[in-house]
Image (cartoon, rainbow, N blue to C red):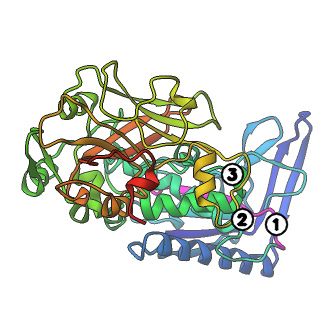
């Protein structure tokens, strides 16, 4: 990456009433050093949250001349893009060589900031390099991995990551950094710290580790994609070579330990028709329900048939937490107390699994199981099952866009026999 510091801003802009004035700011040496420390914290976070798979190496660029342009997103609202910061000196950035460009700047007094900038910089950016920019508001904040500047830096950089994953690498199942609410993370549970919890889990548990080794921004842009599998001979051959026939289902199963590091490429994307073929339920469908932004996200396996499992046939948004055909991700009314995991599970629709048993499925019996990717490796090793171990029974994954914001959400799919008597809660099904 290139790490750019813009210590001096002097731009002619207009306030919300349309009056023209000169907005100016200048960093002290202490503030420049503060930027350096915050960027190092960002580098450390990337290394830590990718499990040591990815390290950011940066070349520092300090702009000697004042930046004289700010971009507007509406009356009185401004931000500094990398194009603005490097106008007339773009040759400071080598063409098509870097994977990222980060700009730190000090917003002048009297200016209402429009945004941090990462969401706008999701393209090939300056001389073929994606950029994100960040204004620092609190110079007295102590630097550290949980400082607002470090957290915001990581968030803006993750915008570049998801853009290049989709539009250059063709890996469309990588979630966006704004998908936290769809996975059950809520800012009201801790503000920046809760935001950072999502960043951590997104990078460590929802994005497969092998992805970080091949992350690249280099290559032509693919057209905007619809959510679906990216077919390749390599992926097809991996499926044929590693898949083990699962008797009676007409599909192949995968061992969790063989695919967990790269499951988005090694596992097939499953459609409703695939779920129907496993269960032999001709009308089975998988619905993703979200009434609106900042509301619970609920997955529901739905069928009109009578099935041999606890089954909630009513509104999935109001199904109580239990082991059934519904997987709910909702917000607690207040943060759960320390050590209150069981009570939090019983009080709110925050679940890990959805499942259904079909009387029409062939023998040996297989229960269709959907799991959150972040906890799937832990759960599959501990499930009480009959016959074949659950960790050897992955079929693929399902991917949907939530109806509220269009964020990508993924679940892993397995076929296991949960035996008799049937567990009624996740805690009964898992060895703890």
x, y (%) of residue 190? 72, 58
Q: Is residue 25 among the parts visible in the rendering? A: yes
x, y (%) of residue 232? 16, 46
**In this rendering, is residue 394 above or below 74?**
below
Q: Residue at x 80, y 62 (%)?
A: 137
Q: Quadrant of residue 52?
A: bottom left
x, y (%) of residue 142? 77, 77
The mark found on residue 187 in the picture is: 3
Label 2 vs label 3, nearer the camera: 3
In the image, residue 139 lies in the stretch drawn in magenta: yes
Q: Marks 1 and 2: in contact by CB < 8 Å?
A: yes
User: In the rendered structure, which segment of residues is drawn in magenta?
Assistant: 126-140
Q: Residue at x 53, y 24 (%)?
A: 315
Mark with earlier residue (3, 1): 1
In whole angstroms, how far apart are the C-alphas of marks 2 and 1? 9 Å
Q: Quadrant of residue 359?
A: top left
Mark with earlier residue (2, 3): 2
Disc 1 is placed on an element classified as loop
Q: Residue at x 72, y 77 (%)?
A: 143
Q: Which residue is mark 1?
A: 138
Q: Quadrant of the C terminus?
A: bottom left
Mark with earlier residue (2, 1): 1
Foreground: 105 or 289?
289
Q: Marks 1 and 3: in contact by CB < 8 Å?
A: no
Q: Residues within 10 Å of mark 1 (few under 14, many from 20)?
A: few
């Amino acid at each position: 990456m290139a790490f750019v510091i813009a210590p001096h801003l002097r731009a002619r802009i207009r306030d919300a009433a349309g009056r023209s004035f000169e907005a100016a700011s200048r960093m002290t040496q202490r503030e420049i050093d503060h930027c350096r420390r915050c960027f190092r914290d960002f580098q450390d976070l990337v290394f830590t949250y990718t499990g040591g798979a990815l390290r950011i190496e940066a070349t520092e660029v300090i702009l000697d001349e004042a930046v004289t342009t700010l971009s507007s997103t509406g009356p009185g609202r401004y931000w500094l893009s990398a194009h603005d910061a490097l106008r007339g000196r773009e040759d400071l950035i080598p063409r098509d060589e870097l994977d990222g460009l980060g700009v730190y700047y000090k917003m002048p007094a009297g200016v209402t900031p429009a945004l941090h900038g990462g969401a706008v910089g999701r393209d090939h950016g300056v001389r073929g390099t994606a950029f994100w920019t960040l204004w620092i508001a609190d110079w007295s904040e102590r630097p550290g991995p949980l400082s607002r500047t470090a957290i915001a830096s990581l968030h803006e950089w993750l915008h570049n990551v998801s853009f290049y994953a989709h539009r250059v690498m063709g890996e469309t199942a990588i979630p966006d950094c704004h998908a936290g609410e769809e996975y059950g993370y809520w800012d009201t549970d801790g503000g920046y710290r809760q935001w950072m919890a999502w960043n951590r889990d997104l990078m460590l548990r929802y994005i497969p580790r092998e992805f970080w080794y091949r992350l690249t921004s280099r290559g032509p842009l693919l057209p905007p994609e619809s959510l679906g599998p990216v077919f390749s001979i390599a992926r097809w051959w991996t499926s044929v070579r590693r898949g083990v026939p699962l008797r009676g289902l007409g599909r192949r199963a995968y061992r969790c330990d063989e695919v967990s590091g790269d499951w988005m490429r090694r596992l097939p994307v499953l459609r409703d028709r695939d779920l129907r073929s496993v269960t032999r339920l001709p009308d089975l469908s998988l619905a993703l329900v979200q009434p609106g932004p900042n509301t619970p996200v609920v997955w529901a396996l739905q069928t009109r048939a009578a099935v041999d499992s606890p089954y909630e046939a009513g509104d999935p948004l109001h199904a109580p937490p239990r082991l059934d055909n519904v997987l709910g991700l909702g917000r607690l009314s207040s943060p759960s107390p320390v050590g209150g995991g069981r009570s939090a599970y019983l009080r709110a629709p925050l679940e890990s699994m959805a499942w259904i048993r079909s009387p029409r499925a062939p023998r040996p019996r297989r229960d269709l199981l959907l799991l959150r990717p972040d906890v799937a490796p832990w759960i599959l090793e501990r499930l009480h099952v009959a016959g074949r171990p659950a960790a050897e029974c992955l079929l693929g994954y399902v991917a949907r866009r939530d109806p509220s914001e269009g964020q990508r959400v993924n679940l892993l799919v397995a076929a296991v026999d949960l035996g008799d008597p049937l567990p009624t809660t996740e805690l009964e099904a898992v060895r703890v």
